[in-house]
Image (tube, grey):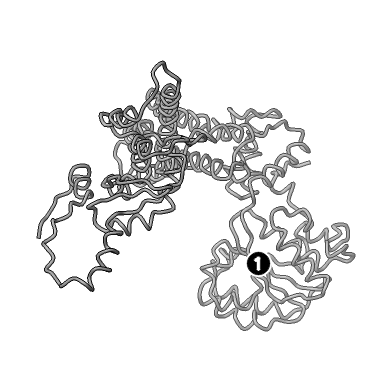
Amino acid sequence: MEYQVTARKWRPKTFAEVVGQEHITETLRNAINNNRIAHAYLFTGPRGVGKTTTARIFAKALNCESPKNAEPCNECSMCKEIQNSQSMDIIEIDGASNRGIDEIRTLRESVKYAPTRGKYKIYIIDEVHMLTKESFNAFLKTLEEPPEHTIFIFATTDIHKVPLTIISRCQRFDFRRIQMDTIKQTISEIAKAEKVNIDDKTLTIIAKKADGALRDAESYFDQIVSFCGDKIDAKTVAQMLNLISDEIYFSVSDAILSKNFKIVFEVTNSIYKNGWDFIDFLDGLIEHFRNIMTVILTEETSLIEAADIYKNQYIEYLDKFSKGDLIRILNFLGRVQQEIRFSQNQKLKIEIALSHLIAIERSSTISEIISDIENISTEKKSKVNKSEDEDYYAEKKPSNSTKNVNESKEEPNKYSGRQKSTVIPRSITNPISDFTIESVTGKWQNFLDTISVEKGLTLAPAVKSLNINSLSGNSLTVNSNFTDIEKTLEINREYLEEKSELVFGRRLKLICVDELAKKADDEEQEDKPEKKSPQKTPTIDPYDDIITNELGGLLIHE
């Protein structure tokens, strides 16, 4: 039997055999079953996705003598005639070679005649966008109101070149690119039927090279079988089709992680020796990092087009690249992609770009930096807190000499020479039984340190300005020259009581003495004559010292 190329030998003969276009084949089957046949159809889409094939199957199904569920039987005389292009009722016209107005006039005359054997006379016009403007205009009336026995099926890859007046008179069906997995499965079934050994890696190479066109994939398959025979090797296929190996892209991403600059020159030298295009390499590298980003964002490989062996390698990058790093890398490669087209030395440009990529340091988000700082601070606090606990229990051990009140009075001296503590004192579970003003004074500095750690720039300056006056039960009387000290203490009353319980073992209520004096003055104002109040001494705001010395501010007096 005479040799036939795979695209013709394995051309689908029924709607069920058409792959990747189920949304169209199902609609056409339903139209036949429900007897809702239009007078004109327009099939549009990329090359090699089944437009002409579907038109022939539709023509067979309409004229088949014994259809089965709207599928042609492929056994009756009509099906065989149409299959062998011998039917006079199915006219296929090439729009590129019959684009003039004279050919359209001839077509208009032939439309009047009824079909010889079949039920419908069907005109399949391929590449209909090649018709001239005058031809389209001459065809409008016939297309809008053709005879009942006539059906037009147009196929085109450039729908934007077809006038809207033609499109509006047809039922439009958009064919889509065939998915990579579908192409791999179809070629695998063809290879099995042809008794050709082919692996997943080679199928992926063919499917990616075909770019969604099954006819192209079948043509590549024929070419590869002619070169390799019955056993196909992926490495040989890549060399024959002059494709860049995916291993090169993985070596670049690995070099970024290991900071191996030697890979830069090995990669560019390999591209140069194999005669690969540097622009194609850059396009593949962008797709490679896009795949890494897809895996990191989705934590799966279903959205990337790669062989199974490479999908496993992409999974290994889950914890090695951050989202911010990949965005920086893709933005940088996008700029290089635009610049390299105008570069006189593309090899040097790629070497500089790859060196730049490897030199990029891993970035961290603000959240990660804050988290690291908090972890370090927590470790330091735990260490210092442990040492203070040891000091605390050491002070509580019984000694030969009995402690007196004077020793507790000297306790603040122990803190006066220290730097500001960065540790929050632990909670006291056993409060001191003899709770006196001396014991409060002894722990006062620890109380200040606690507030300084948590509210160093807000509440701490106000609390540090307090001076202890007296203790009565759970009320601690204090005084201060801080502005609005009463309001500050009232706003933070709950917080101060909690911290006092943490440090002193008892919830203390801080009462400012100025507030008591103010009440006494209000009661005596009625009996005393008005006196001019002496000029108040300007208050010193502790925030001024913090802003000036610690934050580098400048104090401006009005």
Left or right relative to 174: residue 462: left
Note whether residue 551 is visible.
yes
Image quarter of residue 402 = top left
Q: Nearer the viewer, residue 97 or 226?
A: 226
In this rendering, would 234 be left or right of 484? Answer: right
| Relative horizontal placement of residue 533, taking residue 197 as reference (left or right) | left
Closest to the observer: 153 or 507?
A: 507
Task: Tell me what residue is drawn at x 28 percent, y 44 percent.
Answer: 464
Q: Which residue is mark 1?
A: 173
Q: Is residue 149 above or below residue 89?
A: below
Q: Is residue 270 visible?
A: no
Horizontal and vertical percent position of residue 534: 11, 62
In the image, residue 514 above or below residue 289: below
Q: Who's the residue at 27% across and 57% down the image? A: 514
Q: Position of residue 77 (x, y in %)?
A: 87, 61
Residue ranking furthest to the top: 400
Relative height, residue 48 to residue 359 (above, below)? below
Q: Secondary structure at mark 1?
A: strand
Between residue 398 and residue 193, name the one nearer to us.
398
Q: How many marks?
A: 1
Name the spot of residue 185 as percent of width and height, x first: 71, 43
Asked where in the image residue 380 lies, by quadrant, the reply is top left
Which image quarter is the N terminus in? Answer: top right
The quadrant holding residue 503 is top left
- Residue 198 screen position, x and y as percent: 69, 32
Between residues 443 and 556, which one lies in front from this camera angle? 443
- Image-based side of 135 in relation to 64, left or right: left
